[in-house]
Image (spheres, rainbow, N blue to C red):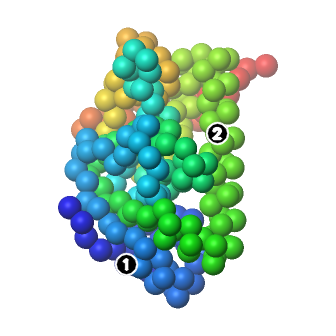
Amino acid sequence: MKCKMECTICPASSASVFSGLPEEKLRQLEQVQTTNVYKKHQIVFYEGNPALGIYCISEGKVKLYKTTEEGKQRILKISGVGALLGYASLFSGQNEQYTAEVIEDAHICFLEKNGFLAFLKKSPELAMAVLSRLSVETIKSHEQLLDQTFKSARRRLAEMLLSLRGSFGQKDKKGVRLNLSLTRDELSQAIGATMETTVRLLSEFKQEGIITEEDHKILILKSDELAALATPAF
């Protein structure tokens, strides 16, 4: 379902690369975007499809994953409000490199390729912001590849929970609640471990009093201890 979101009052305005644009530029941006409403589990775009434009999450959360030759998913990232999707493929001229699936009902703005590129040419400040974000994402991808090679599953899970805490954490009287619901399978896909290993590690974290679960959401009770698990010992 389509709707219209005004860029000047968008909930993502303070978190996206468009946040520094003056109101006049944002009004121009509205002319090349449409907003689509997605339900949980709907696909925004598929890996291998042509890159038709970029997507900006106004509300909700999306998981980005690649599919292995065995048909298994490998989650690359969980993206929330303000995140841009699909821009690396757009600039490289390649097909989409991953599948984007909604994990929480979402409003996502779509900016068609030609209109967005024309807007970008007239907005050097935006071009630099997009380039900066693309560079950061490239560095993170390299780090993720190294993580799979050198870090234990226990450490990778600790780092994932800390990353989710930074992106989706909500302070609670007991600790920090992760304001999203991920299945055991999705967590295992995100850290590159088997579901059995992920379930065992979550149980260990609970037994150690580091985390608990309430209403199907993880509550981090001891952030310092979780951070210690994510830090290598020398």
Secondary structure beneath dot 1 equals loop
Q: Earlier in the sequence, mark 1 or mark 2?
A: 1
Q: CA separation, marks 1 and 2?
A: 31 Å
For the question of whether residue 228 can be seen, the reply is: no
Of the numbered discs in the image, which one, if any, rests on residue 6?
Answer: 1
Q: Return the x and y of residue 162 as percentages of the image width and height.
A: 53, 38
As drawn, is 58 to the left or to the right of 193?
left
As drawn, is 137 to the left or to the right of 64?
right
* Residue drawn at x 64%, y 39% as measured from the top left: 140
Callout 1 amino acid: Glu
Q: Return the x and y of residue 124 as percentages of the image width and height.
A: 69, 73
Residue nearest the observer in this picture, 174 or 185:
185
Residue nearest the observer in this picture, 232 or 14:
14
* Residue drawn at x 43%, y 74% as measured from the top left: 32
As drawn, is 195 to the left or to the right of 167?
left
Q: Would you identify the image quadrant in which residue 8 lies? A: bottom left
Compared to residue 210, the image places residue 120 above or below, namely below
Of the numbered discs in the image, which one, if any, rests on residue 175?
Answer: none
* Residue drawn at x 39%, y 15% as measured from the top left: 70
* Residue drawn at x 44%, y 55% as measured from the top left: 52
Q: Would you identify the image quadrant in which residue 25 lies? A: bottom right
Of the numbered discs in the image, which one, if any, rests on residue 140?
Answer: 2
Please rate how many residues cluster around mark 1, counting C-alpha atoms within 10 Å: few if below 14, some from 14 to 19, many from 20: some
Q: Return the x and y of residue 4 as percentages of the image width and height.
A: 29, 74
Q: Return the x and y of residue 120 as percentages of the image width and height.
A: 60, 71
Callout 2 amino acid: Lys
For the question of whether residue 109 can be seen, the reply is: yes
Please rate how many residues cluster around mark 2, counting C-alpha atoms within 10 Å: few if below 14, some from 14 to 19, many from 20: few
